[in-house]
Image (cartoon, rainbow, N blue to C red):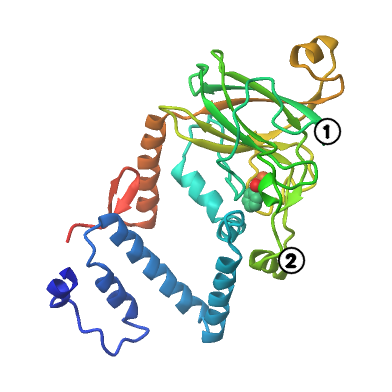
């Protein structure tokens, strides 16, 4: 076993103290030859131990944290992901998305995926409704998708999902008869796609579990402002996970999961002309959502990730090799 072969080079793990436990944990983890894993574990152990030192973490508090994480695990199911909620509510999802999908100034920003994306969505053709009829306030969504040079992107796969008029996603119902308020569309030769849906409503993230209890203890509300989710998949482009937010929502600046970005807030209009109503098969007075999405190419993202990782390490005074935008451990 390799562990035995290198064991001779390891220091004896005896009489460890608050002074030397960190260095020794890092040394024993360093037996891996995976330089990314080695780097991530070295930083994880360093920050975890420093966190405990700095907060003077008590045994009772650490046990409460373990019980909290256990409760998060126990409430998870195929349709309930408490750890995504936790990551979202702690701002970690927002941070990871920004770092992993950097964008040029004129590209559409990404935002949190959340736990309600599903692979069950059906395909629709442009103009169809992704929601069941006669529920919610009708809304026609008219969009384009282009690259950062303004060139339309044809045949981009667009995955869309939103809640029903009560603020629940289809997957939150115990009894379901197929996907609702979600769908897959393709952009046409001009990069345009359009569909009928309902005007998004604000809703609370699931708060009947440990993350909800944590928010309550922190005096935080669990609401998300009204929004519609979009995910773009297109060869040669970085996958874009984003949402559009309806301007003027009472939770616009206090989203429980930190997902709102100014360029994603849009003012809804209404259908005013009979001509438009006829063109899209909607009624005068229905809501209209319009947006021009801009995707970032894979080359643009790769270059930005490399640049931003190097800048971040330099700021921290750390010298490490950066491969594909990710720092790795030095060679032994
Ligand atoms: C959502 O927008 O679907 C969502 C995002 C984060 C947590 C819960 C829900
Ligand atoms: Fe949502």
Q: Quadrant of ligand 2?
A: top right
The label nearer to you, 2 versus 1, is 1
Left-right relation of 186 to 323: right
Which image quarter is the C terminus in? bottom left
Estimate how packed mark 2 is, as few (under 14), some (14 to 19) or many (20 or more) residues with alpha carbons within 10 Å.
few
Q: Earlier in the sequence, mark 2 or mark 1?
A: 1
Q: Is residue 180 left or right of residue 25?
A: right
What label does residue 219 carry, if any?
Answer: 2
Note whether 67 is above or below 98 in the view shown. Answer: below
* 329 or 227: nearer the viewer: 227
Going 53% across and 30% down the picture, which residue do you hit?
107
Quadrant containing the N terminus is bottom left
**What secondary structure is found at the residue carrying circle 1?**
loop
The percent coordinates of residue 245 (x first, y second) are: 70, 38
Q: Secondary structure at mark 2?
A: loop
- Residue 158 in view, yes or no: yes
Decide: few, some or many residues near mark 1? Use Cα within 10 Å; few <14, some 14-19, many ≥20: few
At 80% from the left and 29% from the top, the residue drawn is 138
Q: Is residue 106 left or right of residue 31?
A: right
Outermost residue toward the bottom in this view: 15
Q: Which residue is mark 1?
A: 137
């Amino acid at each position: 076993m390799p562990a035995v072969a290198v064991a001779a080079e390891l220091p004896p793990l005896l009489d460890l103290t608050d002074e030397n436990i960190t260095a020794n944990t890092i040394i024993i983890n360093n037996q891996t030859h995976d330089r990314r894993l080695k780097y991530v574990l070295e930083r994880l152990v360093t920050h975890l131990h420093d966190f405990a030192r700095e907060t003077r973490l008590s045994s009772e508090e650490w046990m409460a944290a373990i019980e909290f994480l256990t409760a998060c695990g126990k409430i998870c199911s195929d349709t309930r992901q408490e750890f995504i909620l936790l990551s979202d509510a702690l701002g970690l999802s927002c941070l990871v998305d920004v770092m992993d999908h950097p964008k040029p100034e004129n590209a559409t920003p990404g935002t949190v995926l959340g736990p309600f994306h599903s692979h069950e969505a059906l395909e629709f053709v442009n103009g169809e409704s992704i929601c069941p009829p006669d529920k919610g306030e009708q809304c026609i969504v008219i969009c384009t998708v282009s690259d950062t040079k303004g060139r339309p992107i044809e045949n981009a796969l667009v995955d869309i999902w939103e809640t029903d008029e009560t603020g629940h996603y289809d997957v939150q119902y115990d009894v379901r008869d197929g996907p609702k308020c979600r769908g897959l569309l393709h952009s046409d030769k001009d990069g345009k796609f359009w569909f009928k849906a309902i005007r998004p409503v604000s809703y609370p993230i699931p708060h009947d579990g440990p993350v909800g209890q944590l928010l309550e203890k922190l005096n935080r509300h669990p609401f998300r402002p009204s929004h519609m989710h979009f995910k773009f998949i297109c060869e040669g482009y970085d996958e874009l996970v984003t949402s559009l937010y309806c301007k003027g929502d009472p939770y616009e600046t206090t989203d429980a999961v930190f997902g709102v970005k100014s360029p994603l807030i849009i003012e809804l209009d209404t259908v005013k002309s009979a001509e438009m109503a006829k063109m899209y098969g909607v009624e005068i007075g229905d809501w209209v959502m319009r947006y021009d999405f801009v995707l970032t190419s894979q080359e643009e993202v790769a270059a930005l990730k490399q640049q931003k990782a190097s800048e971040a390490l330099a700021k921290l005074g750390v010298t490490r090799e950066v491969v594909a935008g990710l720092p790795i451990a030095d060679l032994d």
